[in-house]
């Protein structure tokens, strides 16, 4: 007689299957393993039940309801997978613990506020911080890059001769080229001169460096820990000669764009930025990966 597989074995099988389809399931996978160990520790036998899933999801008493809902949602996807083989599996109803995501209220910065932010960044103390933060914030405002995309830039990704950024494996592992305005390119060039003078032998190949010559990260700078993404609601530039537009670290013109800097991580999404070129290799990769979404038995975890 074949022994009944444990909950941990079932979760591991599920994660292995999903990952062969290209899903990372990093944090969600860790949570599911915690769920499986909880089920075994409490002596649960048999398929997933709604009561078990809800009880585990609400274990962190001090957590937010959205986090409970997110944990339950991870188990729900696993239960949907198991229900195909075991009809006795209970799939928790969608939204049983409320929404998994609550959008924060963004603050729409005016051009004057953006200019004030850049001026304040240039008054920061230490050797590199005023140069790095001022240029970084200006780059975010003038290109609409995500903060993580800007922090991931290396020297090879910034072509100051052509005026193009190479954003590699960003959201959904997609890459793209982002053209720069002439004034933005010049501001980045000035920053590179200062950076190389202060750190002639840096400890990192990152484009933006800290006072110690290491790569700039969220955790490494308190100013960035609260900074969120400038995202555009209008075209970046009106086009024309090089004296139009704005550069990194410079005040924007009132008719060029409006910027949304969210004070919360859960800022609403806004339309994609213009002037973005995608390489043929990226399009090919996207087509190859799109096939997995045709599998009806798997629903993508969001």
Image (cartoon, rainbow, N blue to C red):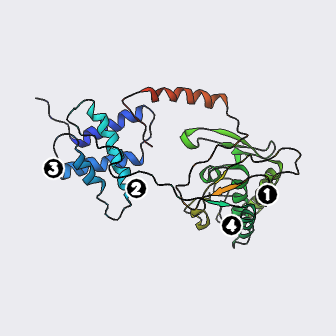
CB atoms at circles 3 and 1 under 8 Å apart? no
Within-10-Å neighbours for mark 4: few <14, some 14–19, many 20+: many
What residue sits right under mark 2 in the picture? 66
Within-10-Å neighbours for mark 3: few <14, some 14–19, many 20+: few
What residue sits right under mark 3 in the picture? 43
Query: Alpha-carbon distance for marks 3 and 1?
Result: 64 Å
- Mark 3 or 4 closer to N-term? 3
Please tell me whether mark 3 or mark 2 is closer to you in this view: 2
In the rendering, at what x and y percent does residue 51 appear?
Answer: 22, 49
Return the residue nearer the eye: 190 or 93: 93
Asked where in the image residue 271 lies, by quadrant, the reply is: top right
In the rendering, at what x and y percent does residue 277 appear?
Answer: 70, 35
Quadrant that contains the N terminus? top left
Residue at 64%, 43% in the rendered image: 272
Query: Alpha-carbon distance for marks 2 and 1?
Result: 38 Å
Query: Alpha-carbon distance for marks 3 and 2?
Result: 27 Å
Residue at 86%, 51% in the rendered image: 244
What residue sits right under mark 1 in the picture? 254
User: Image height check: is 298 above or below 128?
Assistant: above
What residue sits right under mark 4 in the picture? 129
Query: Alpha-carbon distance for marks 2 and 4?
Result: 35 Å
Asked where in the image residue 90 lies, by quadrant, the reply is: top left
Seen as rendered, the residue at the extreme left is: 1
Query: Alpha-carbon distance for marks 4 and 1?
Result: 27 Å
Asked where in the image residue 106 lies, by quadrant, the reply is: bottom right
Residue at 62%, 32% in the rendered image: 282
- Mark 2 or 1 closer to N-term? 2
Return the residue nearer the eye: 20 or 110: 110
Please tell me whether mark 4 or mark 1 is closer to you in this view: 1
Q: What element carries label 2?
A: helix
Q: Is mark 1 on a helix, strand or loop?
A: loop
């Amino acid at each position: 007689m074949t022994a009944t597989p444990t909950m941990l074995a079932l979760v591991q099988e599920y994660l292995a299957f999903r990952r062969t389809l290209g899903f990372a399931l990093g944090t969600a996978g860790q949570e599911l393993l915690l769920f499986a160990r909880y089920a075994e520790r409490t002596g649960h036998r048999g398929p997933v039940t709604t009561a078990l899933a809800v009880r585990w999801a609400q274990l962190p008493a001090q957590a937010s309801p959205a986090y409970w809902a997110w944990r339950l949602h991870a188990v729900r996807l696993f239960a949907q997978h198991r229900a195909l083989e075991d009809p006795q599996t209970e799939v928790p109803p969608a939204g049983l613990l409320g929404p998994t995501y609550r959008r924060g209220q963004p603050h729409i910065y005016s051009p004057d506020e953006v200019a004030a932010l850049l001026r304040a960044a240039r008054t920061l103390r230490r050797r590199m911080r005023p140069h790095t933060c001022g240029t970084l914030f200006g780059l975010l405002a003038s290109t609409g890059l995500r903060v993580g995309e800007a922090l991931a830039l290396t020297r090879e990704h910034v072509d100051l001769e052509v005026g193009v950024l190479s954003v590699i494996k960003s959201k959904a592992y997609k890459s793209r080229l982002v053209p720069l305005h002439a004034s933005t390119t010049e501001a980045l060039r000035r920053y590179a001169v200062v950076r190389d003078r202060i750190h002639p032998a840096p400890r990192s190949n990152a484009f933006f460096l800290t006072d110690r010559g290491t790569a700039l990260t969220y955790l490494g700078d308190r100013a960035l820990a609260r900074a969120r993404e400038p995202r555009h609601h209008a075209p970046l530039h009106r086009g024309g000669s090089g004296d139009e537009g704005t550069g990194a670290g410079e005040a924007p013109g009132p008719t060029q764009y409006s910027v949304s800097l969210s004070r919360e991580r859960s800022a609403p999404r806004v339309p994609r930025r213009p002037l973005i070129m995608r390489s043929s290799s990226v399009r090919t990769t996207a087509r190859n990966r799109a096939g997995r979404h045709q599998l009806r038995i798997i629903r993508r975890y969001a």
